[in-house]
Amino acid sequence: MAIAAPLWVAAQNAILKGKITDAATKEAMAGATVTLLDYNLQTQTDANGSFSFNKLRNGNYQVQITFLGFKPLVKAISIKDDTQVDLALEKALFLADEVIVSATRASANSATTYKNLSKADIEKNNLGQDLPFLLNQTPSVVVTSDAGAGIGYTGIRIRGSDATRINVTINGIPYNDTESQGTFWVNLPDFASSVDNIQIQRGVGTSTNGAGAFGASLNIQTSTRYDSAFAEVNNSIGSFGTIKNTLKVGTGLINGKFSIDGRLSRIKSDGFIDRGFSDLKSFYVSGAYYGKSSILRANVFSGAEQTYQSWYGVPEAKLRGSQADLLTHYFNNLGSTYFTQQDSLNLFNSNPRKYNSYLYDNQTDNYQQDHYQLLYAKEINSQLSFNGALHYTRGRGYYEEFKHQEDFEDYGFAPFLIGAETIDKTDLIRRRWLDNDFYGLTYSLNYKPSKALDFTLGGAYNEYKGAHFGEVIWARFAQLDNNKQRYYDNDATKTDFNVFGKATYSLNNFSIYTDLQYRRVNYSFLGFNNAGNNVQQRDILNFFNPKLGLTYQIDKISNVYASFARANKEPNRDDYTESTPGSRPLAERLDNVEIGYRYLRKNVTAGFNLYGMFYKDQLILTGEVNDVGAYVRDNVDRSYRIGAEFDAKWQISNQLSWATTATLSQNRIKRFSEFFDVYDASFDYLGQRENQYTNTDIAFSPSFIASNEFAYKPIKALEIALLTKYVSDQYLDNTSNNARKLDAFFVNDLRLSHNLNFRGVKNVNLSLLVNNIFNEKFESNGYTFGYILDNNLITENYYYPQAGTNFLLSLSAKF
């Protein structure tokens, strides 16, 4: 690249400049986005509507101009020397689909730390891996995969916060599971193929719908209007028997008012981990009506998954220990984890990085989730607009597992005698079911009486009904009625109401932002009373979440901002059901401070921010047994995350771009206690021992995260990109103990993309993604537990190894 640099400079001397105006009023349009298609060059017009691109090669270019509320314009430009082009945009005949998510989005001058990903950003990495892996190059993100290859059960953390603390909405509708508060992307395979754009807000962010954002928000918008009919076929193959097939079709606008588009997908993979297969299917259908001042859109999408369980992880003694370490682990867990000769052979003979403890053929997770959305937006007049949505989600499924030597009393079986021997244990196969319904409405009313004032009133009401039950479908020694026996059955109901009002007022170069939200949660569930008996219980929580921000526009290309935001969050299902009212944990509170600087120029975008996230009563695992004998999370009085984030992209030339992110943070718990179970030499339980800690690291919170992407286009149709990710050490628990941690990892991926032109075909793309090109051996997730046996501390660490060098090859055609 260095040798070729003088040649690039010599060939890049032309200047393209111009002015964008409103075709009707002839007024200059400030803030219009101007893009040189195929070259990743983008800028915005200044206060006079002017723009320019410097150091361009002579040749032909496609210039695209977009502005919300106006028709996009694409103009072919031929450049020989310095060129001036003046263009006018016409008012759009229809509302833009973006109004549907505008109520929960941060804007360009918002005092919020965020990252926008366009459809093109998502498409270039979408070769079959789950959505979290497509976000891996964004700031403060760490992703993981149970099966090791990014397909199946995958997870994401942002600023060290896990999925239960990341608020996810799809078209403004909550997606997080209502009770566990997690997100399970395995239930929406290949969903990225139906996504138009994503905004990632880090920290508390703006008011949104669903559970409180305690680390970040993912605000997803699905496919928007296509004016022309289209069809697209995308097929991928890859390592570990991976196959992805996607078909997309759309009618375009029919009679200038109607459109229908859809997608059908299938993904299959054997997984990197032994038997860690995934069999995933999904579809997406959307129909829309566009009036002169309104949009009515109906979305139906669904995902069905079967995955072999790879939830257990690999014991540290197996992954990196000596034979003596492995034998010690084996005998410590004989009779609790390892029962049969097959278990033993599997442990000692399998590949250490691919080991899966499960051997039962149908040790699978099976679930289907169907989503129905009806979205409506109306421009009442030039100052007032409304949008609302009705939604319904139906979910049902189970996971099946083989269990050794289970106690009869846990399943409602009666012991019996065989000769003089009492039989009160049995091998069995069980299914644990979840059957749920989630429905509700969201709304927002936007009032903009002048350029200086923008006010939004919004909110939502949602209800969840979940049935939890378990069935024994086979038992070696017990008698089943009708080939199955239900051994637990309980229902839960949860309602979630919120209303928010937010306003932005601009004065000269200042913009003041306020956002006030009230949220009420009502949860009814089967739990324990103070006597330790199971009874139906209820908890009602009321939260007030205020936010305040200030932005100062330094000049046309840069601004600074500062904000304060508070969020409150209720405990999750296990915290409630495995405790009594006396031991039930408190709700958590987060105070978030953000200070940042944003810079946007013709070929450089950059953002730098400082953040502080200060928790009251954060919930963490301590190992303590509560009054019903359960290990649940405890509140810690004070904890915090403070850090600095950097996010930039530099279009060095038409051929070469550089994008980078970095996060440096400190994540601490002021004071907490860790508890260990204590056993004597005969494994008789003696109680618990307490260790106290101060100023320790929060689990799974690396102090340094960085990503880097160099993309080079030797010719217009070919891109070569090197993607790099570094994550520093992470602790498996909150004790800062070096014996319980994930080692730092540094992973490099290579992406090749080549566009081909054929008559009658809009585009043919051939892409190759080679992950982990240097075959780094690393683990991105894990867990730990310990106990004291005969006055000796036994620590068990488990890890989730990720795949070495592997590839995905994709061929897509657009018509």
Image (cartoon, grey):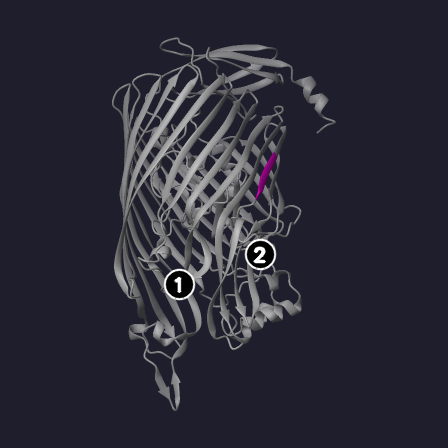
The circle on residue 630 is 1
Sequence-earlier tag: 2 or 1: 1
CB within 8 Å, label 2 to label 1: no
As displayed, is residue 194 above or below residue 563? below
Segment tinted magenta in the rendering:
703-709
The amino acid at mark 1 is: Ala
Seen as rendered, the residue at the extreme bottom is 419
As displayed, is residue 191 above or below residue 601? below
The picture places residue 238, in percent across and down from the top left corner, at 56, 49
The amino acid at mark 2 is: Arg
Q: Residue placed at 38% from the left, 35% from the top?
A: 250
Residue 704: in magenta span: yes
Quarter assignment of residue 531: bottom left
What secondary structure prevails in the magenta region? strand
Whether residue 256 is visible: no
Q: Is residue 612 left or right of residue 431?
A: right
- Label 1 element class: loop
Q: Is residue 8 left or right of residue 240?
A: right
Residue 111: in magenta span: no
Comparing 218 with 715, the one in front is 218
Q: Residue placed at 54% from the left, 20% from the top?
A: 601
Residue that badge 2 annotates: 740
